[in-house]
Image (cartoon, grey):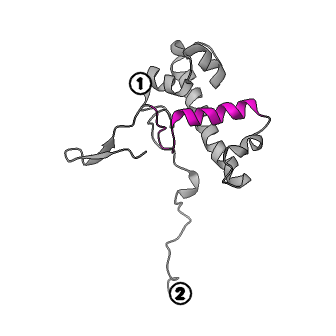
Amino acid sequence: MRVARYYCPTAHMTFSLLPDCLAARMPGDLDTVEQVVAAVAAARSVEAVADLRPDTALPGAVRWIRRRLGSVRAVLLALVTTLPTLVGACQPTLGAIGAQLGTPVLRRVRAEAEKILASLPAPVGFGPRLRSSTHRRTACEHDMGPDPPS
């Protein structure tokens, strides 16, 4: 599904209206992401659920699953720590939060925590994208190109 983007000439930035069912910064919808995480919770290991991506080799499927698993864990941990009145004193798992809010959990979280969506991580919230430490330039790196004359 393509999401329309609009340009604001006053703010000099683009924005879009993301439907409630779609995951932020991740292809697919929230229900699919939730199904993957629930399948991992019920399985022995991440590799046991790798057949959710039959078109991909095992290492690629495991990376695909772990990206979703890590993102959802971060969302649930942030929810439990920032809104304890909403979910009570429960573990940051789909099952525990689902017992408090109902299912589908991720869509319910997005609806209930609408005031803090800007600070919640993706795929539920719209918080800032985390920068990886491997792409930072350090002082010991040099510019590309030929060596300077000696």
Is 18 displayed left or right of 94 in the figure? left
Residue placed most toward the observer, 102 or 81: 102
Indicate whether residue 68 is drawn in magenta. Answer: no
Which quadrant of the structure image shows residue 104?
A: top right
Is 75 displayed left or right of 7 in the figure? right
Instruction: Point out the image quarter for the N terminus.
Output: top left
Residue in the image at 39% along x and 37% along y: 18
Q: Which residue is mark 1?
A: 114
Q: Amino acid at mark 2?
A: Ser
Distance of mark 1 from mark 2, alpha carbons? 60 Å
Q: Which residue is mark 2?
A: 150
Q: Considering the numbered disc 1 on the image, is that residue within a helix, a strand or a loop?
A: helix
Residue placed most toward the observer, 57 or 94: 57
Which quadrant of the structure image shows residue 89?
A: top right
Q: Eyeballing the image, is 72 above or below 141?
A: above
Please report the bounds of the magenta region as a residue range: 21-43
Is 73 displayed left or right of 41 in the figure? left
Q: Residue farthest to the bottom? A: 149
Instruction: Indicate which disc, 1 or 2, sits on the residue closer to the N terminus.
Output: 1
Q: Residue 37's spot in the image, x, y percent? A: 65, 34
Q: Eyeballing the image, is 68 above or below 12?
A: above
What is the crowding at mark 1: few (fewer than 14 residues within 10 Å), some, or many (at least 20)?
few
Residue placed most toward the observer, 57 or 69: 57
Residue placed most toward the observer, 150 or 92: 92
Q: Residue farthest to the left? A: 10
Question: Does the CB distance between marks 1 and 2 fall below 8 Å?
Answer: no
Q: Considering the numbered disc 2 on the image, is that residue within a helix, a strand or a loop?
A: loop
Q: Residue 25's spot in the image, x, y percent? A: 48, 43
